[in-house]
Amino acid sequence: SQQGEEDPQALSIQEGENATMNCSYKTSINNLQWYRQNSGRGLVHLILIRSNEREKHSGRLRVTLDTSKKSSSLLITASRAADTASYFCASSGSARQLTFGSGTQLTVLP
Amino acid sequence: EAQVTQNPRYLITVTGKKLTVTCSQNMNHEYMSWYRQDPGLGLRQIYYSMNVEVTDKGDVPEGYKVSRKEKRNFPLILESPSPNQTSLYFCASSFLADASYEQYFGPGTRLTVT
């Protein structure tokens, strides 16, 4: 079942600004991942946060996880035009399946 | 180079004509999976495989078949394609027999069924 929902569906910002995307899920999870997809291409893994973690950083990326609210957020700081892409959260409650959200289309204007 | 490859990358076919989309990974990964991506729906899982000869249905398996005879290959078979199977298809793999870890995606196959 499709359990991830992302907000907003689309986001447009100026270069240098921060971009925040949110993800909600419905069932308990082992971990939550974020992926990036450039137009029509394969997804690329960005970051994974475990269910017992609350925050994780990787370069300009910051991910938070609130298991009580079943939600996560991805913050991209100091955005660049090259960050323009779709971003997906993916949650797993078991070893068998990874369930993706519907994605946020981020446009960073130069 | 470590990668997941898919062939063909683009395919236009007619209703009812059987087709196979191949997927191969060179990373000795245990887990492999097929997804379809449709506008506004994100990625939906079709089938997955935890290991050789072990396959299971995902969320949208109707109209598809898979096999995992070798660890590196995981073909997707459409026995009788229909227009509602027009979509962008992705194969993915993961090192462990566990979907909850980082998945590596192929470049995608854009299928049009007329």
Image (cartoon, helix red, strand yellow):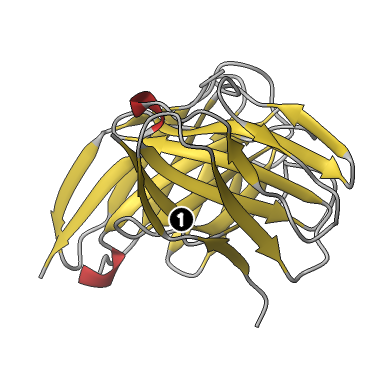
Q: In this view, does B68 lie above or below A23?
A: below
The residue at the point 71 percent across, 50 percent down is: B74
The residue at the point 26 percent across, 33 percent down is: A8
Residue A79 in view: yes
Give the amino acid at mark 1. Answer: Gly
Q: Is residue B48 left or right of residue A81?
A: right
The one nearer the camera, A103 or B86, is: B86
**Percent position (x, y) of residue B89?**
47, 45
Determine the chain carrying the residue at label 1.
Answer: B
Q: Is residue A84 left or right of residue B77?
A: left
Q: In this view, does A58 lie above or below A64?
A: below
Q: In this view, does A108 lie to the left or right of A7?
A: left
Task: Tell me which corner region of the image, top left, top right, bottom left or bottom right, holds residue A50.
Answer: top right
Quadrant of image for the N terminus of chain A: top right
The one nearer the camera, B17 or B11, is: B17
Count of numbered badges drawn on the protein: 1
**Percent position (x, y) of residue B101?**
72, 49
Quadrant of image for the C terminus of chain A: bottom left
Mark 1: few/some/many CA within 10 Å (<14, 14-19, 20+): many
Residue B102 in view: no
Q: Name the residue under label 1.
A: B108
Task: Tell me which corner region of the image, top left, top right, bottom left or bottom right, holds residue A93.
Answer: top right
**Percent position (x, y) of residue B108?**
46, 55
The residue at the point 30 percent across, 65 percent down is: A83
